[in-house]
Amino acid sequence: MIRQRGISPLPCSNAGPRPPLLILAPAILFICFICAGCLTPGIRYAHNADMARQSARHYYVPANWDYREHYVIPQDRLRRIIDSYRGTPYRRAGMSRKGLDCSGFVCVVYKELNHARLPRGTGGLRKLGYEVGASNARLGDLIFFRGGALNMINHVGICLDNKRFVHAATHGGVIISEMSSDYYTRRFAFVRRLF
């Protein structure tokens, strides 16, 4: 029997485990790029005017500044979104162009307008924002109505001004109605301003 010594097989590309550094290299490189992006100075907001003057990257914002007070609803865009839904049929629990109910209409309009995720249903919507008088209603305010056997708040629409509102009605789908109509005057509850 003849034995050969010292002969080893030629290295093969799939022989043995790969070195750990080659496996981790893409992950390490990705983390380095992320960290480099985080380390670059960004825009900062300061509640102190002296601090804001020290750097061109700081903007002064008063300590009592409230974005909701200064937010302006883009009225032209809101009107275009509302107009695009006019005539959409009513569908209970609907939240698409195939069909909407009243709170679904409000939710999809505000989601399209500014990516706001509003509560689904009049019970959650009625808690948002703050109450304003019907004579002070403006475009974008929510208007609520009572109805049903228990006279609870069960309908919501979006004000176009202090005389008209748009809503998803059970008969007619998304329509514009007058606040002064006898039907809605008797059922009116309040107007709430989100922004």
Image (spheres, rainbow, N blue to C red):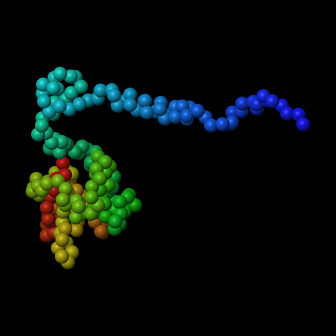
Percent across and percent down for residue 30 are 46, 33
Give the residue at x 16% y 61%.
179
User: Is 60 on the left or on the right of 94, as rendered?
Assistant: left
Percent across and percent down for residue 185 are 14, 66
Percent across and percent down for residue 79 are 26, 49
Which of 48/177 is in front?
A: 48
User: Is 111 on the left or on the right of 151, as rendered?
Assistant: right
Q: Classify residue 6 by image quadrant.
A: top right
Which of 154/13 is in front?
A: 13
Res. 168 in view: no
Q: Classify residue 103 by image quadrant.
A: bottom left
Residue farthest toward the bottom in the current orientation of the protein: 149
Res. 127 in view: yes
Please state the total of marks drawn on the protein image.
Answer: 0
Position of the N terminus, as image quadrant, is top right
Which of 77/118 is in front?
A: 118
Give the residue at x 22% y 45%.
73
Give the residue at x 33% y 28%.
39
Residue farthest toward the front in the current orientation of the protein: 1
Which of 18/136 is in front?
A: 18
83 w.r.t. 89: above or below: above
Residue farthest toward the right in the current orientation of the protein: 1
User: Is 187 on the left or on the right of 111, as rendered?
Assistant: left
Give the residue at x 11% y 55%.
132
Percent across and percent down for residue 194 are 19, 52
